[in-house]
Image (spheres, helix red, strand yellow):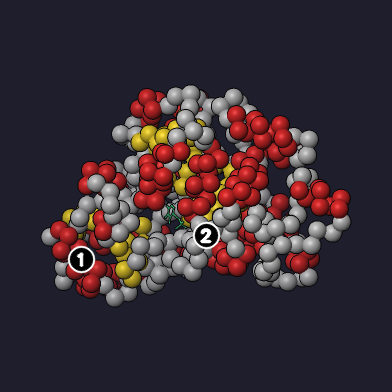
Amino acid sequence: MSYKAFEKKDLGFTTRQLHAGYDPAEHNGSKAVPIYQTAAFELGDYERCLRLFRYEEEGDSYVRFSNPTNRVLDRRLTSLEGGSASITFASGMAAISGTFLNLCQAGDNIVSVRTLYGGSTELLQSVLKPYGIEARFIEDENDVESYRQYIDDHTKAIYIEALGNPGMNVLDVDAITELAHSYGIPVVIDNTFATPYLFRPFEHGVDIACYSATKYLSGHGTVIAGMVSEAGTFDWLGGRFPQFEAFYEEYKDLIDDKTLRTQMFTQRLRIVYLMQLGGHMSPQTAFYVLQGMETLSLRMERHVYNAQKLAEFLDQHPAVTEVRYPGLPDSPYYELGRKYFPKGPGAIISIRIRGGKEAALRVLENVEIFDYMTNVGDAKSLIVHPASSTHFGHTPEENAAAGVFEDTLRISVGIEDIDDLIADIGQALDRS
Ligand SMILES: *Cc1c(COP(=O)(O)O)cnc(C)c1O
């Protein structure tokens, strides 16, 4: 029954988040997904060993690149995304860096926006640069036509985020994917802030979705984890990606053609990057992510409900000069938010405090329920001063472009009782 749930795409999201990708009959009837705490697996016989190492047979040999616990998680996310395959990494940054390396070789470039997660901006503009991979940051990300001037024959992806950090800006994803595909370029999205429950990347033409599963997917602030999911519809053999053509040549006689073509991105991530660079999620962590994902839709509903109420409260509070949340009608992203996030535009809010940095720091000192932390996507509410933490070390111009000022606070709204959250932030603002 349960395994069938993986294949049945007509089952609801909440049913699939509990059952998809797992058959207890394959695991001694265990109803919870077992944690395979082992470094390696018995290979059986010589012929099977060869089949495994040629990737002809799905199975496990060494846990640097696969494990049955992680495979359930791969399948579960694939089912929730409506894609073709997924793969687990030790962190969101491992997932994102693996993705960039899979896309680019020296001389290539990635076209991206200024409103990315700080670590991703840093990776693109500082870490990859000496390896010959260039990041081209778009001046005005809302002007999709202007993206054309950044694209050339060596552009290997347009990289965006579902909800910008921390300004919660919403991009016109349909227009971006249409433009990218007209050049034969894939679109990669970091869907961490939205999750597949609030935003459906592949239904809007996105080709690859990356996640920090540290956040809402696991949902309780207990693990560092990352994932990549692929839609399965992009043609990697269209001429722009010699590395995928070489990969196809190498595996076309071993892996079934449809599987190889539709799972090309994740297969290569596993066979080249997990295999050679490492960075796989541990099976313990996969278990925690699976456990968290069982309640994903329920948590997200409560997260967005609370975020909307809190944003409305903050919007009328005299100590707050600006609230950035796409669910507010005066947000410049309200219409796009309604189009792309019909269930609610996430649960991160950024605010600016009257009285500048000192006043903002007093809010941090005086909150009691909100915890002062750089994390987001925990069931518990969190608050942070981005300029001195997540966006520390960037120039004021770079930060302004991302919506980060000295008086900005970013709130990750948890699932507590909304009256308590409003009372807590209210008293801290009153004392700012
Ligand atoms: C946290 C985060 C990351 C990095 O993920 P880690 O799991 O911390 O490595 C990437 N993108 C976004 C949007 C994030 O919030």
- The residue shown at (42%, 26%) is 151
Q: Marks 2 and 1: CB-CB under 8 Å?
A: no
Left or right side of 150 for 260: right
Left or right side of 189 for 396: left
**CA distance separating discs 2 and 1:** 30 Å
Q: Quadrant of the N terminus?
A: bottom right
Can residue 180 be seen here? The reply is: no
Q: Determine crowd level at label 1: few under 14, some 14-19, many 20+ residues with C-alpha closer than 10 A.
A: some
The tag on residue 225 is: 2
What is the x, y in percent for residue 318?
Answer: 15, 61
- The residue shown at (47%, 52%) is 93
Mark 2 residue type: Ala
Q: Nearer the viewer, residue 184 or 66?
A: 66
Is the residue marked 2 within 8 Å of ligand 1, measured from its CB?
A: yes
Mark 1 residue type: Leu
Residue marked by disc 1 = 361
What is the x, y in percent for residue 82?
Answer: 61, 47
User: Of label 2 and label 1, which has the lower sequence position?
Assistant: 2
What is the x, y in percent for residue 193?
Answer: 43, 54
Q: Nearer the viewer, residue 401 or 389?
A: 389
SS state under label 2? loop
